[in-house]
Amino acid sequence: MKTIIYYFTGTGNSLDAAKKIAASIGDCELVPIASLVKDQDTITPAAERVGIVCPVYFAGLPLMVASFAERLCPDASSYVFAVVTYGGSGAAPALGQLDGILREHASRGLDSGFSVRMPGNYILMYESPKGTRRAAMLAAADGEIARITGVVRECQRQKLPRSLVEQLVHALGYGWFRKNAHDKDRTFTVMDTCTACGTCFAVCPVGNITLVDEKPVFSHNCEVCCACIHACPAQAIQAGSKTGRRERYRNPNVTLADLKISHTETP
Ligand SMILES: Cc1cc2nc3c(=O)[nH]c(=O)nc-3n(C[C@H](O)[C@H](O)[C@H](O)COP(=O)(O)O)c2cc1C
């Protein structure tokens, strides 16, 4: 059975999950959602099984994923599943949001939706778990990904999770995120330690960074994925006064090269 998994990732957690599911079910194409934003055409996947894998942002979907979902039109007979990776809470409303968008725009919802807890990467607010805590979290995530893969392989339908508290968090915070996300990079600064290597430019999934005199300049079309901040080898990109002290994160199973191509081509 042919499968297409569409994914969005900033620091590799969602790509790690997508790759593991793809490797296990076989005959699966991985498509970066960021590579589909150039045009606005309807997306009709040529596959019997369709997956969407992305992080949770403010108890909802990354803006790019929400726009992508509005254009996605899977065949009525196909099996459609979603996996959201998250740091602590908010997975249920994110899956509900995706299900709602598909119902509205494609006249069908998700057949199943899953969440995988992985290290949180929102460095503007906190430092990612590290050391043994990070390792334990990733080991538990691997177990959950294996379980999800079993359900997906059998195309089993599964009820979406629900949480009133998380729905309230979504209602309170997601509108603010939607309004302010693209401008979040106005708080980003580049230190003199920048070596002009261009990594930030290469990993940004939305082409939000241009290099002027080989140094990054942000264009206020930010997805807040934090890829540039985490991937900079010199830790030269900051957002406010606190990020300087916070360790950077990249999922250990994903390379910088994986992230660099994640917005331009099918790996
Ligand atoms: C802008 C932003 C908002 C986030 N909001 C949430 C959230 O509401 N709940 C949560 O559990 N994790 C949140 N996170 C953490 C990510 O969902 C989590 O680290 C995810 O696994 C990152 O996936 P990626 O490595 O594929 O980018 C947020 C991260 C970012 C960058």
Image (cartoon, helix red, strand yellow):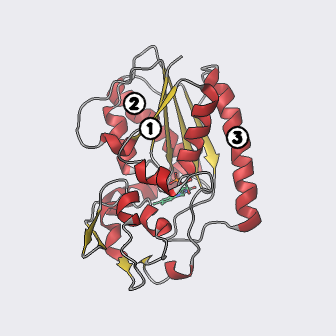
**Disc 2 to disc 3, C-alpha distance:** 25 Å
Name the residue rendered at 63%, 58% in the picture.
Answer: 119
Say which residue label 1 marks: 98
Residues at discs 2 and 1 in contact (Cβ within 8 Å)? yes
Q: Position of residue 56 (x, y in %)?
A: 51, 51
Kind of residue at badge 2: Leu
Apparent side of residue 32 relative to residue 138 in the rendered image (left or right)? left
Apparent side of residue 210 relative to residue 116 in the rendered image (left or right)? left
92, above or below 228, in the image: above
| Observer-nearest of 5 and 267 | 267
Kind of residue at badge 3: Glu
**Disc 2 to disc 1, C-alpha distance:** 6 Å
Kind of residue at badge 1: Leu
Camera-nearest label, 2 or 3: 3
| Observer-nearest of 204 and 242 | 204
Say which residue label 2 marks: 102
Say which residue label 3 marks: 144
* Chain-order first, disc 3 or disc 1: 1
Label 2: few (<14), some (14–19) or many (≥20) C-alpha neighbours in 10 Å: many
